[in-house]
Amino acid sequence: MKKIIYTKNAPEPVGPYSQAVSASNFLYCSGQIGIDPKTNELKGDIKQQTLQVIKNIEAVLLEAGLDFSSVIKTNCFLSDISNFSVFNEIYSQFFTSKPARSCIEAKLPKNALVEVEVIAYKE
């Protein structure tokens, strides 16, 4: 059975998609950029945006009854791959279960510096 996951503690979707979809034991989370859900603003450097992305992902995971330890795969997008070490330093503090990961350079919505999407598994 498929279930749409939504929380006010993460940014509103800006298009025809959901924050996340639960299907069977899997949770597929849409990519999050560093928009603050309280102000609907994207601001700050790579550190600030990465921290906000992490908060947004955490909010979606919590709404689904999960946490970072449930994440089995991440897809990470950086607008400038030279920010990788700064991004990775922050990322590693939260994704301590070391999920599988891809990380590429890409042009991102709203000129964001970072976007992360996750797949989680509920046992």
Image (cartoon, grey):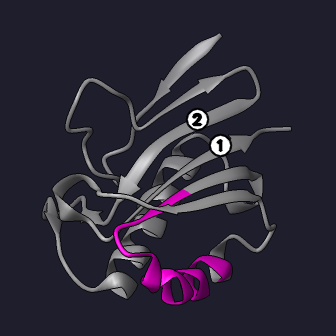
Magenta: main secondary structure = helix
Q: Amino acid at mark 1?
A: Ile
Left or right of residue 9: residue 62: right
Q: What is the crowding at mark 2: few (fewer than 14 residues within 10 Å), some, or many (at least 20)?
A: many
Q: Earlier in the sequence, mark 1 or mark 2?
A: 2
> Considering only vertical position in the picture, is 93 above or below 1?
below
Instruction: Single out the residue that lies furthest toward the top.
Output: 1
* Magenta region includes residue 84: yes
Residue at image point 44% right, 84% down: 83
Residue at image point 20% right, 38% down: 14
Numbered badge on residue 28: 2
Residue at image point 64% right, 75% down: 94
* Residues under numbered marks 1 and 2 in contact, where contact means CB atoms less than 8 Å apart: yes
The span shown in magenta is 76-92
Identify residue for label 1.
Answer: 119
Q: Position of residue 69 (x, y in %)?
A: 76, 60
Q: What is the crowding at mark 1: few (fewer than 14 residues within 10 Å), some, or many (at least 20)?
A: many
Instruction: Single out the residue that lies furthest toward the right.
Output: 123
Taking depth in this image into account, of 1 and 48 the one nearest to the observer is: 48
SS under mark 1:
strand
> Considering only vertical position in the picture, is 122 above or below 110?
above
Q: Quadrant of residue 78?
A: bottom left
Q: Quadrant of residue 39?
A: bottom left
Q: Position of residue 68 (x, y in %)?
A: 68, 61
> Considering only vertical position in the picture, is 89 above or below 80?
below
Q: Position of residue 65 (x, y in %)?
A: 64, 44
Q: Position of residue 45 (x, y in %)?
A: 27, 86
Q: Amino acid at mark 2?
A: Tyr
Q: Quadrant of the C terminus?
A: top right
* Magenta region includes residue 26: no
